[in-house]
Image: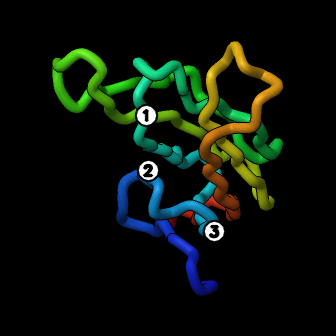
Amino acid sequence: MAKGCLYLGMGMDSSMKVGENDDGKVIELMVGQILEVELRENPSTGFRWELSAIGPELKKLPKEKYLPDSKAIGAGGRRTMEFEALRTGSAKILLEERRPWEADSPPVKRFRIEVKVIPPWLKL
């Protein structure tokens, strides 16, 4: 296993969760497994995480959620997006935090990971 590579193997859940600390890392998943990406966000500022690029080996699932840290007005929270590993290969995911109406402005943050999708293990 490569240095900086997170691995999800046999006997573990069929999903893996990553966050800000995993920016720039390589993630290994088997075909059919789900990757959850959870990032800090404060939508009251207008900034929101958006998917900017994804490889064909992966699919973004429609299930996306935002969980506030508190009920206080203007409080931040966490946005979670899910991706499914469709076929073997190597794919990048790029998420950018920006205001949707400021398309010409650079993002305030970027989150990048590389996902290596490996074949599912044979069941005996």
Residue at the spot 47% in from the left edge and 55% down from the top edge: 20
Please name the amino acid that badge 1 sits on.
Glu
Task: Give the position of the N terminus as an image quadrant.
Answer: bottom right
In the rendered image, residue 54, in percent from the top left (x then y), is placed at 76, 42
Q: Which residue is mark 1?
A: 41
Q: Is residue 86 above or below residue 13?
A: above
Residue at the spot 47% in from the left edge and 44% down from the top edge: 36
Which badge, 3 or 1, is on the more N-terminal residue? Answer: 3
| Front disc: 3 or 1 | 1
In the rendered image, residue 26, in percent from the top left (x then y), is placed at 63, 68
Q: Which residue is mark 2?
A: 14
Residue 59's quadrant in the figure? top right
The one nearer the camera, 120 or 99, is: 99
Alpha carbon of mark 2 to alpha carbon of mark 1: how far?
A: 26 Å
**Circle 2: is it few (<14), some (14-19), or many (20+) Cα within 10 Å?**
some
Alpha carbon of mark 3 to alpha carbon of mark 2: how far?
A: 18 Å
Task: Label 3, secondary structure: give it.
Answer: strand
Disc number placed over residue 26 in the picture, else none: 3
Residue 88's quadrant in the figure? bottom right
Which badge, 2 or 1, is on the more N-terminal residue? Answer: 2
Task: Label 1, secondary structure: give it.
Answer: strand
Q: Is residue 111 above or below residue 102?
A: below
Please name the amino acid that badge 2 sits on.
Ser
| Front disc: 3 or 2 | 3
